[in-house]
Image (cartoon, rainbow, N blue to C red):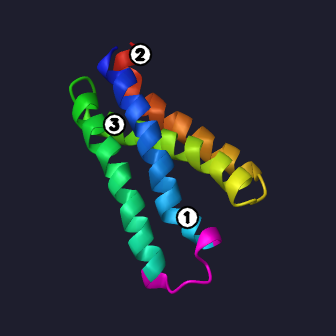
Amino acid sequence: MPPILISISLLVCSNVFMTFAWYAHLKELNNKPWIIAALVSWGIALLEYLFQVPANRIGYTALTIGQLKIMQEVIALSVFVPFSVMYLKEPLKLDYLWAGLCLVGAVFFMFRSKFA
């Protein structure tokens, strides 16, 4: 499998854990002291890093650091929006579309040398 696809797959897994670490405590632990939420989040974040570090190391063999970062941001938004709507029951906003379009522009500028 090409390094870029491996990196994308690992970053998707990483971002699922990252999103849960950052935001699930708002729903699940909202009646607990913040320190409990922080410790639980750190545990989840460890799992995130176990995917993120190899994803970036593998991805860096084929992409620049800027390309890796923009790819991660696209994946983060792609994971966050369904999480926000389905798990946290937040309303789906048109602002997510506008943010996504801005990221499309960022992808174009960071990857345009690969498109040419």
Q: At label 1, which amino acid type do we have?
A: Tyr
Lateral position of residue 102 relative to residue 70, left or right: right
The amino acid type found where label 2 is placed reads: Phe
Q: Nearer the viewer, residue 13 or 8?
A: 13
The numbered mark, 1 or 2, whose residue comes first in the sequence reads 1
Q: Is residue 78 above or below residue 18?
A: above
Q: Is residue 23 left or right of residue 59?
A: right
Q: Which residue is mark 1?
A: 23
**Neighbourhood count class around disc 3 (C-alpha, 10 Å): few under 14, some 14–19, many 20 upward:** many
Q: Position of residue 34 (x, y in %)?
A: 48, 83
Disc 3 element? helix
Q: Residue at x 61, y 47 (%)?
A: 99
Tell me the quadrant of the picture where the N terminus can be found.
top left
Q: Amino acid at mark 3?
A: Leu
Name the residue tied to disc 3.
68
Q: Is residue 110 among what the camera can see? A: no
Provide residue 95's location: percent of width, then percent of height. 70, 52
Graded by Cα atoms within 10 Å as few (under 14), some (14 to 19) or many (20 or more), the crowding at tag 1 reads some
Q: Characterize the local packing of mark 2: few (<14), some (14-19) or many (20 or more) Cα atoms within 10 angstroms.
A: few
Q: Is residue 4 visible?
A: yes
- Element under disc 2: helix
